Amino acid sequence: MKLLLDQNISFKVSKKLKTNIPELFHISDFDLLNSQDEEIWKFAKRENYTIITFDADFYDLQTLLGFPPKIIWLRFGNTTTSKMIDFIRTNISSIRNFITSEDFDDIGCLEFYNLS
């Protein structure tokens, strides 16, 4: 399960969760920090990452281009780094299931509306 955090999520999240989720990276790990969304999209598709973002633009790209990559769209607004870490830890099972289960092969976007 390869996860890529968008620039609107702190790089500290991936650093804190690296032990639990070894393939969780931030776009800054790949020198994509100031890249356009489409460039990040292409990288994620080529390298088989699922993008975690607050940005609706990735959903728009998915509507136009299809998937992969899959998207995890956080629709609860910005939050603290510690709350984001807790959110991912709490929801990692759902995230993993969305990415790996055949039940979700035809679904490209998982949306979360709150921090729980």
Image: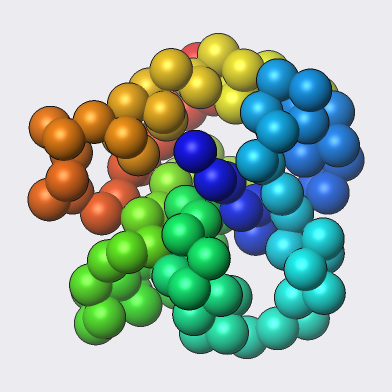
Instruction: Examine the rendering and report whether any part of residue 46 can be seen.
Output: yes
Image coordinates of residue 70 in percent, x first then y, are 36, 55
Q: 10 or 32, which lies in front?
A: 32
Position of residue 115 in the picture relative to residue 27 (left or right): left
Residue 62: image quadrant is bottom left
Task: From the viewer's perspective, tell me whether residue 3 is left or right of residue 45.
Answer: right
Rendered position, 51 above or below 32 = above
- Rendering coords of residue 76 (x, y %): 51, 39
Q: Percent x, y for residue 16?
A: 85, 28
User: Which residue is found at the position 71% from the left and 49% from the top?
Assistant: 25
Q: Nearer the viewer, residue 106 or 79?
A: 106
Coordinates of residue 61 in the picture (x, y in percent) = 35, 77
Residue at image location 27% in from the left, 66% down from the top? 67
The answer to which quarter of the image holds residue 88 is: top right
Question: Quick check: can you spot residue 8?
Answer: no
Examine the rendered structure and indicate whether residue 35 appears above or below residue 4. below
| 42 in relation to 54, above or below | below
Residue at image x 51%, y 22%?
92
